[in-house]
């Protein structure tokens, strides 16, 4: 296995690509008594149109999430969650727009639990009857999401930012879309995306990296498969799809999300740098240490719920700021005005250096979590990035980079505002 030592963050990573295409990462932690494993596929809510066997398939919105639910079924009528729990593990799974991941943490019986994880994720088993039965459970989950103002605000934001890109899709789908899902469509999706060459296994704990690879070789299919072509829609215009959107829900104070549409960088390392720069620029412009935050807070336009961050997925990237506000439009206008001023007059050098140091420290502290280590590694691998080079990336960032970022992207035509206003919803 290839051994990588990252002296600046005190991490050692072993990695290997198996004969079937599975990429394995292991973080040896001999001083700890716990273990964590994350087994993920590059398949999420965006991947509804793809090519399988030379034919393009259009699958219902929400199918990746539906498949995640059904993967825990086992041929003996049991459930893999229960199997893992009975062996002392704490298992779970999630589906995002870009990936689906299955994971567990334990302090004992690690190899038994890892075997269970690899077996149930790699071998699907469900019937038409079990698929139908799951529909009611997922419909209830969808209704809970639809009743959540924060989730609705973010969903409306994505639909306003993008005209064509399937990031607009709800990961869970809708009651109408999941009604189209059958056992056969789930098997097709598993065949396409739950193949070792489209997956990654990340492990942290007091383990032998070679043993992890040996167990994966024993359990998983041995043949590598070609990558699956995906269709993420027509090319996106530079400007946002809609400048404003919103709805009425049962909230006490207006809830807003402001989005800035950004053109994603072309390759993995550039995307990682742009993400770190985007987050740092957000903090410099409107983070809790910025003059703008203090001004808006003092004026009563924002409160402690306010946040800002940079997000990116294959083929799209954006900044988002949001929270509660009695006047969301005034907050949006103030952010754009301050961005224009700082792009022209320049950022405070002392503040920028302090924020860069703080961001570096936050990233380092996050590595204390085995889950953060493994999930960050998996996501970065799918995006062809090395996440542990962040110290060198921060070293290279300048105030000018952040000012250029503000100048390029914080423009009215790049901006959308979503507001959830108080009131009674109408059917």
Image (tube, grey):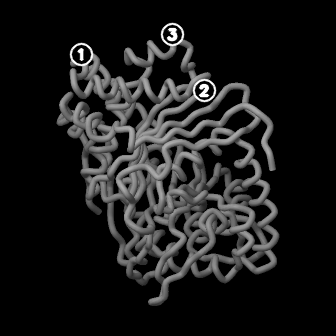
Identify the residue position indicated by label 2 in the image.
Answer: 324
The x and y percentages for residue 381 are: 36, 58
Specify the quadrant that holds the N terminus: bottom left
Q: CA distance from mark 2 to mark 3?
A: 14 Å
Q: Earlier in the sequence, mark 3 or mark 1?
A: 3
> Tag 3, which secondary structure?
helix
Q: Along the horizontal axis of the image, is 328 left or right of 181?
A: left
Residues under numbered marks 2 and 3 in contact, where contact means CB atoms less than 8 Å apart? no
In this rendering, does residue 263 appear at all?
yes
Residues under numbered marks 2 and 1 in contact, where contact means CB atoms less than 8 Å apart? no
Vertical placement of residue 234 versus 192, above or below: above
Q: Earlier in the sequence, mark 2 or mark 1?
A: 2
Vertical placement of residue 171 versus 325, above or below: below
Residue at x-position 74% and y-position 63% = 175
Which mark, by number, is residue 350?
1
The x and y percentages for residue 202 are: 44, 56
Q: Along the horizontal axis of the image, is 281 left or right of 108?
A: left
In this rendering, does residue 29 appear at all?
no
Which mark, by number, is residue 81?
none
Q: Along the horizontal axis of the image, is 316 left or right of 274?
A: right
Residue 109 position by quadrant: bottom right
> Tag 2, which secondary structure?
strand
The x and y percentages for residue 197 are: 41, 73
Disc 3: CA contacts within 10 A as few (<14), some (14-19) or many (>=20):
few
Residue at x-position 70% and y-position 59% = 81
Residue at x-position 44% and y-position 72% = 231
Q: CA distance from mark 3 to mark 1?
A: 23 Å
Identify the residue position indicated by label 3 in the image.
Answer: 298
Residue at x-position 67% and y-position 66% = 66
Disc 2: CA contacts within 10 A as few (<14), some (14-19) or many (>=20):
many
């Amino acid at each position: 296995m290839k051994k990588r030592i990252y002296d600046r963050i005190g991490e050692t990573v072993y990695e290997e690509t198996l004969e079937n295409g599975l990429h394995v990462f292991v973080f040896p932690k001999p001083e700890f008594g716990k273990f964590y494993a994350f087994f993920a596929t590059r398949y999420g809510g965006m991947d509804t149109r793809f090519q399988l066997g030379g034919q393009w398939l259009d699958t219902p919105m929400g199918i990746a999430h539906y498949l995640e639910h059904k993967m825990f079924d086992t041929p003996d009528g049991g459930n893999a969650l229960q199997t893992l729990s009975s062996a002392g593990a704490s298992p779970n799974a999630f589906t995002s727009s870009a990936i689906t991941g299955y994971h567990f943490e334990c302090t004992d019986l690690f190899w038994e639990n890892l075997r269970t994880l690899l077996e149930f994720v790699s071998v699907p088993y469900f019937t038409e009857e079990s698929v139908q039965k799951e529909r009611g459970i997922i419909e209830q989950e969808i209704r809970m999401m639809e009743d959540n103002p924060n989730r609705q605000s973010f969903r409306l934001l994505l639909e306003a930012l993008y005209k064509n890109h399937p990031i607009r899709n709800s990961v869970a789908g809708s009651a109408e879309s999941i009604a189209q899902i059958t056992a056969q469509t789930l098997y097709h999706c598993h065949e396409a995306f739950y193949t070792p060459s489209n997956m990654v296994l990340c492990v942290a704990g007091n383990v032998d990296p070679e043993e992890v690879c040996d167990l994966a070789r024993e359990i998983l299919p041995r043949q590598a498969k070609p990558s699956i072509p995906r269709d993420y829609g027509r090319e996106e215009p530079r400007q946002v799809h809609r400048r404003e959107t919103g709805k009425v829900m049962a909230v006490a104070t207006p809830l807003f999300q402001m989005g800035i549409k950004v053109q994603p960088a072309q390759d993995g390392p550039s995307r990682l740098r742009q993400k770190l720069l985007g987050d740092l620029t957000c903090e410099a412009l409107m983070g809790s240490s910025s003059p703008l935050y203090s001004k808006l807070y003092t004026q009563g336009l924002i409160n402690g719920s306010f946040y800002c961050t940079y997000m990116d997925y294959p083929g799209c990237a954006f900044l988002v700021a949001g929270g509660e506000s009695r006047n969301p439009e005034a907050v949006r206008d103030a952010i754009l005005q301050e961005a224009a001023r700082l792009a022209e007059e320049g950022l405070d050098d002392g503040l920028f250096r302090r924020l860069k140091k703080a961001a570096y420290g936050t990233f380092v502290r996050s590595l204390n979590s085995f889950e953060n280590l493994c999930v960050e590694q998996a996501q970065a691998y799918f995006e062809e990035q090395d996440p542990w080079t962040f110290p060198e990336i921060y070293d290279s960032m300048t105030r000018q980079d952040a000012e250029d970022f503000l100048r390029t992207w914080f423009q009215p035509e790049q901006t959308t505002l979503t507001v959830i206003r108080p009131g009674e919803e109408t059917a």
